[in-house]
């Protein structure tokens, strides 16, 4: 997966918006105003890309034990977020599944009103 494929994959999900709320480097994808995926553009340029993704706490621990590329979330809550490195032992298919999981956790945490507004727009 490259940065363009990541961008297109995240943007294909209903209600997703992109932002640079922290600096010019950190690309953030949000749904309903809440972030579910963030990445450093500089790290993509340097060939060491990674994503921060929300994860259910028990699953986060299991994934960290199973994959070298999955670590506690960098600059995030270590309980709820993982940093996942590309080009390591996590396949593109697994990366998409982790993005999906993060998106679903955030979408399901939104109010029913916001969820239905997003559903109506798609």
Image (spheres, grey):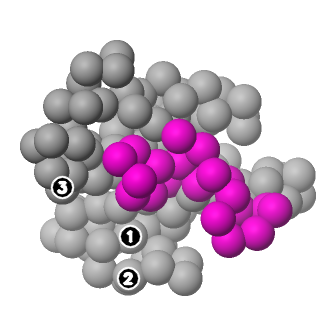
Q: What residue is shown with label 1?
A: 81
Q: Quadrant of residue 35?
A: bottom left
Q: Secondary structure at mark 2?
A: loop
The one of 7 and 117 positioned closer to us in this rendering: 117
C-alpha span from label 1 to label 2: 6 Å
In this rendering, is residue 23 above or below 34?
Answer: below
The answer to whether residue 58 of the structure is visible from this angle is yes
Disc 1 to disc 3, C-alpha distance:
15 Å
Q: Earlier in the sequence, mark 2 or mark 3?
A: 2
Q: Main secondary structure of the magenta part?
A: strand
Q: Position of residue 114 (x, y in %)?
A: 23, 42
Question: Does the magenta-highlighted stretch encompass residue 117?
Answer: no
In depth, the one of 98 and 40 nearer the eye is 40
Residue span colored magenta? 17-37
Q: What residue is rendered at 72% in x and 38% in y?
A: 3
Q: Earlier in the sequence, mark 1 or mark 3?
A: 1
Which residue position holds label 2?
78
Give the farthest residue toward the left: 112
Residues at discs 1 and 2 in contact (Cβ within 8 Å): yes
**81 horizontally vs 88: left or right:** left
């Amino acid at each position: 997966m490259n940065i363009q494929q990541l961008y297109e994959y995240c943007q294909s999900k209903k209600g997703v918006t992109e932002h640079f709320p922290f600096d010019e480097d950190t690309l953030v994808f949000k749904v309903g105003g809440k972030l579910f995926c963030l990445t450093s553009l500089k790290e993509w340029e340097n060939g060491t890309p990674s994503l921060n993704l929300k994860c259910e706490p028990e699953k986060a621990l299991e994934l960290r034990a199973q994959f070298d590329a999955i670590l506690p979330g960098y600059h995030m809550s270590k309980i709820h977020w993982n940093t996942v490195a590309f080009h390591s032992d996590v396949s593109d298919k697994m990366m998409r599944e982790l993005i999906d999981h993060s998106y679903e956790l955030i979408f399901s945490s939104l109010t029913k009103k916001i969820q239905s507004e997003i559903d109506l727009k798609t």
